[in-house]
Amino acid sequence: MSAPDPVPSTTAALLDPPLHVAIIMDGNGRWAAARGLPRREGHRRGVEALRRAVRAVGELGIKILTIYSFSAENWTRPAEEIGDLMGLLKRFVRKDLAELHENGVRVRVIGERAGLDPEVLSLLREAEELTKSNERTTLIVAFNYGGRQEIARAARELAIDAVAGKIDPEKIDPAAIESRLYTAGLPPPDLVIRTSGEQRVSNFLLWQAAYAEFVFLPINWPDFDRTALEEAIGEYRRRERRFGGVTARAGV
Ligand code: IPE
Ligand code: IPE
Ligand code: MG
């Protein structure tokens, strides 16, 4: 009789998954360039990777997935590329919304809505409205999102309330700011994954990721799959989160 197969290292990822995983989906352009293809093709394949990611998150029992789909700074890209990205977003919502809904996914969109194309805006609203009572997984789409802009917006709202006499400026604390972020009421990410090998935050969840663990994967986003997600979770589980305190391991 042969020895039993060793427990696959990825099993640990399944046992105690992080509650909230956030992903900076980066490297579509490089994926395409490496194959002599237009950037648009990289973005198209990136949507397929997103589908795999949402499926894997559901299978692994992760409750919240936040994806960085378009940053406040991405408007500086050429108009043609912006058009491609908007087209893909619209197609994704049109094609995938029913299936997401059937799979118990609740869609939330974070980011600045003022000034967005009305068609994009109404599709995003439709996705949120249709899925608002779903409970299996929450998919937070960061679209036209910037962390600095989000914090500035919270500060602006607090200032307006202070001038109107509705709040005491002396009492403004982190909780007051948090309650005015796009993510109010949602738990912060435990794990932030960035693909493409780039090791920077690019204005993503600046406030919320204060104590997140960061895992940088060397693959480009169109190559992302469940195995890559399990690898990132395995790495996350090897980390020791301290939140500024002293733990048994650190205290000896
Ligand atoms: C991520 O891929 C998609 C978006 C930022 C919208 P990129 O388009 O940034 O690809 P690279 O970084 O140029 O390879
Ligand atoms: C971050 O990627 C934004 C998204 C993934 C949507 P970028 O490609 O825009 O970031 P930089 O420019 O390399 O920092
Ligand atoms: Mg990039």
Image (cartoon, rainbow, N blue to C red):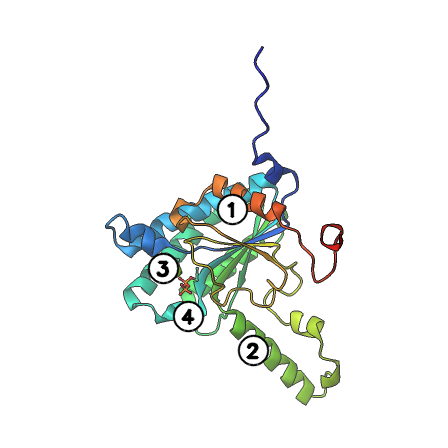
Instruction: Look at 50% across and 70% down and name the residue there.
Output: 112
Cβ atoms under marks 1 and 3 closer than 8 Å: no
N-terminal-most mark, 2 or 3: 3
Extreme residue in the left direction: 36
Q: Is residue 175 left or right of residue 95?
A: right
N-terminal-most mark, 4 or 2: 4
Extreme residue in the top direction: 1
N-terminal-most mark, 1 or 3: 3
Please say whether residue 8 is visible from this viewpoint.
yes
Above/below status of 227 relative to 74:
above
Q: Few, some or many C-alpha atoms within 10 Å of disc 1 (few <14, some 14-19, many ≥20)?
A: many
Instruction: Look at 61% across and 76% down and name the residue there.
Output: 154
Ligand 2 closer than 8 Å to label 4 CB: yes
Q: What is the CA distance from the residue labelled 2 to the residue labelled 3?
A: 26 Å
Instruction: Look at 44% across and 66% down and name the residue there.
Output: 71
Residue designated by label 1 = 100
N-terminal-most mark, 4 or 1: 4
Q: Position of residue 195 (x, y in %)?
A: 44, 53
N-terminal-most mark, 3 or 4: 4
Q: Mark 2: which amino acid?
A: Ala
Ligand 1 closer than 8 Å to label 3 CB: yes
Q: Position of residue 228 (x, y in %)?
A: 48, 43
Residue designated by label 3 = 85
Residue designated by label 2 = 152
Q: Mark 3: which amino acid?
A: Leu
Residue designated by label 4 = 73
Q: For this rendering, which residue is in front, 131 or 89? A: 89
Instruction: Look at 49% across and 40% down and name the residue there.
Output: 226
Q: What is the CA distance from the residue labelled 2 to the residue labelled 1?
A: 32 Å
Q: What is the CA distance from the residue labelled 4 to the residue labelled 1?
A: 28 Å
N-terminal-most mark, 2 or 1: 1
Q: Mark 1: which amino acid?
A: Leu
